[in-house]
Image (cartoon, grey):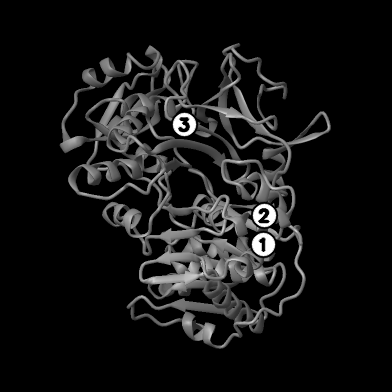
Amino acid sequence: MEYNLADLFEAIADTVPDNLALASGDVHHSYADLDKRANRLAHYLQGRGIGPGDHVGLHLFNGHEFVEAIVALFKIRAVGINVNYRFVGPEVRYMIENADLKGVITQRRFIPVINEAMQGLPPLRSLLVIEDGSDTSSNQEAIEYETALGQGSEKRGFGPRSGDDLYIIYTGGTTGMPKGVMWRHEDLFFTGLQGGSPGGDPVESPEQLIEQVREGWYTVTMLPCAPFIHGAAQWTQWICHLTGGKLVLQPGPSFDPKRILSLVAEENVSTMSLVGDAMAIPLIEELKAGDYDMSNLAVIASAGAILSASVQEEIEALLPDVMIINSFGTSESGDLGRAAAGEESHEGRPSFYMGDEVTVLDEEGNPIEPGSGKIGMVARSGRLPLGYYKDPEKTAERFKELDGKRWVVPGDFATVEPDGRITFLGRGSKCINTGGEKVFPEEVEEALKAHPDIIDALVVGVPDPRFGSKVAAVFSTRGQKQLSLEDVQEHCRKHVAGYKIPRQITITETVSRMPSGKPDYKWAEEIARSQAVA
């Protein structure tokens, strides 16, 4: 057996067929049930000409269909491509063309977007539609999802697979059009999926993984709050299923804190993953307002955005027995490291203990000396993606050969503490140059969110005649409380250097973020610039 995710899933389904694999609304699938439904979908897609190396768009909300589809596609050595359900026609067209989609699985309500995106393009080999009560019709042949499953066999009968099969995650970050990060299954298994042993040493063979599942060593019940159109939630699914555990989903298009907290008790959730303060704060407010049984919850992990210190403190006060973890990683690097609550640098920023494969490099490609105070870029070696799909230029930018070793440099600036911990400062693409000084927005955002009245914040640069750019903050407050610029500046002086303090503020009802919880800096820049002009 190889480290192929479909092979491993099938072996686990054979080992613990009656274990619950998936709880999504009213749908509860055992491993045997999920395997059979994935087989049906895989055979249907094969019959439509989808095969090894082909790409199928998953233009879906969270739900059992997304999980069934991604497993089914791996069974036939095809690849599921995440397509953001908030994209409009031209953006979906970009995804169809850039990812060379041969098929799409979508919600009925998105058919008008698909129709627009497909104008002038040859028909897809397969268009599957999940009914959601909408009344729209497709301009090309389409089939209802459950009808398609009814036409496929529940038996396997697929050919051999390989650890070299691809898993592609399209990632857009905060700027530019999405890029497809290409992982070999085997590399992703060890670099992004915790080697089959969450929190433990990676397995040494596929057979060891199956034995662990049989013995129930690492079995977990996990609830990812982020949408499956982003890699973090998908990887949570695989981490969970590689333990023989139960994946719990809140199906649908939006994050519902009431439903999320109810599911913790209903489904005995042990681990919840979320994306930073944008998800944590609504959960905190709901915990304060409601009566929820959280006795089964052991871990809250944030990935994709760091939980600020003040938010961590609130969670700890409400859930003193729950471990709070900030995880750091990217679609290009996999899992880089974690920091439990309280493991902070002297400036209050979460710092991470890293493995031997992770370091911080200066401009010449040399490792930063711990405690030197120098700023460099985080880099990882070892098992890495092959690069970006159809984008050799971006691949060359991010994946570098240094002294005979291949590194990925995702674009995160950091420094190294005297004890070897790595403190992240933010993405260079949003770095603000004010009077020759570099300001990383995330650092100032953390300072702002330490204010007791500020809920969420984004920091951007706006033009300034004297300094070139000045720091501007866009934030929301509890009860929409009005704060003066002087109040905010006085607070920030306790946390960051003077040149990093906001020179302009805008208070909004809410702070806009992507479906994943990642910052919408374009939105913040538009608001801040409009006020600067005014």
Q: What's under tag 2, amino acid-wise?
A: Leu
Mark 3, residues whose alpha carbon is within 10 Å: few (<14), some, or many (≥20)? some
Name the residue: 76% across, 59% down.
Answer: 2
Give the residue at mark 3: 340
Q: Earlier in the sequence, mark 3 or mark 1?
A: 1
Q: Quadrant of the N terminus?
A: bottom right
Q: Is there a contact, CB below 8 Å, between mark 2 and mark 1?
A: yes
Q: Is residue 244 left or right of residue 277?
A: right
Q: What's under tag 1, amino acid-wise?
A: Leu
Which of discs 2 and 1 lies nearer the camera? The answer is 2
Q: Is residue 101 visible?
A: no
Q: Earlier in the sequence, mark 3 or mark 2?
A: 2
Give the residue at mark 2: 209
Q: Position of residue 293 (x, y in %)?
A: 28, 50
Please say if 293 is above or below 60. above
Q: Quadrant of the C terminus?
A: top left
Q: CA distance from mark 3 to mark 2?
A: 26 Å
The image shows a total of numbered marks equal to: 3
Name the residue: 61% across, 47% down.
Answer: 197
Q: Position of residue 295 (x, y in %)?
A: 33, 47
